[in-house]
Image (cartoon, rainbow, N blue to C red):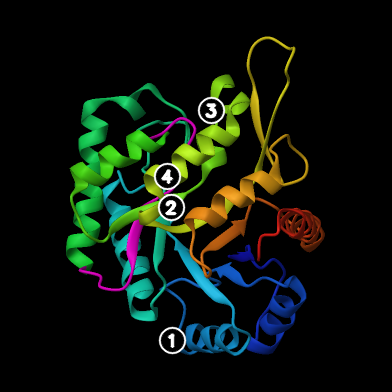
Amino acid sequence: MRLGGTIVGEFNTPEEFEKLLVKSRFRAITAPFTYLDSKERIDSLVKVCEKNDVLISEIGVWRNTLIPENLEYAKGQLRLADELGIECCVNIAGTLSSLSWDAADYSNYTKDTYDMIVDSVRSIIDDVEPIRSFYCLEPMPWMLPDGPDAYLKLIKDIDRKQFAVHMDFVNMINSPRRFLCSLEFIEECMSKLGPSIKSTHIKDSKMNLTAYTTHVDECPPGQGMLDYPKVLKILEKYLSKDGAILLEHMNTFEEYEKAYDYVYEAALKANVEV
C-alpha cells in the first residue's frame, strides 16, 4: 500500500513543491491543485509527482452539491481527474442544513434528501462521462453513506459504473458498538466495499469508556485506541499494492510526520509493506 497524505506548507514553484514532497516521504497524496489552476501549474506539479513515483490518489470537491451552483465545480474536478487519470474524485453527499455545508441534520436522512443525493451524483457523472476516474462519496458519521450497507444501497440506486467508494472507516465508527468492535467493523467495511474502493483515509478513534453519554472522537493515528497493526493487516488484505492510505486532518508538517512514523512502525510490526 502507498502511505501518504496532504502536502502542507507554502509553495509557489515546482521546485518548492518537490522539496516538501520529498521531505514528507509520502508515496501518495491528495491533488495539490484544482481545475481552476492554470494548465502550466497543474502539469508542472504532476511531473514532480511522476518523477518521485508519488501517486495522486484523489482530488477533492468539498462543496455541497445539493446546492445546484456547486455542481459545476464538482464536474470540473471530475473532468480534470479523468484527464489526468486520478482514480478518485471525492466529495461528501451534502446537507440541507442551514448550519454548515457538512452539518448533522435530521434532513440528512429523509427520502427527499436521499433522492437529491442520487440525482446530483448521476448529474455529475452523466455530464462528464469519465472513463478513468470515479466519483466517490466519503462516508460521514451523520450523513449518508454512514455505513457499508448504506454505501452498497447508494451504489445500487445511483447505478453508474463510474460511481465508486472512498473509504473512511473512522468516519463510520459513530456508535459505541462500532467503536468497541472496531476490528470486526473495519473488516465488514472492507469485505463489503473493497472491490470498489479507490482511495482510503486513515485516522484513529477514541472514546471515554466510563463517561455518559457517548462521545466518539477522531484523532491522528497513534493518539486513539485502534489496534493499528491489526487495522493495517485488514487493509492489506483488500487493497492493492498501490492502494493509497492517506493521513488527513492535520495542520503542520510535524503533525503529519508524527502520524506517518506511527503508522510506518505499526506496518513494520504487522509485516505490512507501505
Expressed as whole percent of the image width and height from the top left, the position of residue 143 reads 41, 34
Residue in the picture at 81% in, 56% down = 258
Indicate the amino acid at tag 2: His
Residue nearer the viewer, 126 or 222: 222
Question: Which numbered disc flags the more N-terminal residue, 4 or 1?
Answer: 1
Mark in front: 4 vs 1: 4
Mark 4, residues whose alpha carbon is within 10 Å: few (<14), some, or many (≥20)?
Answer: some
Q: Secondary structure at mark 3?
A: loop
Q: Which residues are magenta?
A: 129-144
Mark in front: 2 vs 1: 2
- The residue beneath circle 4 is 191
Do the residues under discs 3 and 2 have CB atoms within 8 angstroms?
no
Expressed as whole percent of the image width and height from the top left, the position of residue 218 reads 65, 37
Question: Which numbered disc flags the more N-terminal residue, 4 or 3?
Answer: 3
Farthest residue in the top direction? 212
- The residue beneath circle 2 is 166
Is 153 displayed left or right of 80 in the figure?
left
- The residue beneath circle 1 is 39
Question: Which numbered disc flags the more N-terminal residue, 1 or 3?
Answer: 1
The answer for how far apart the CA atoms under marks 2 and 1 are is 27 Å
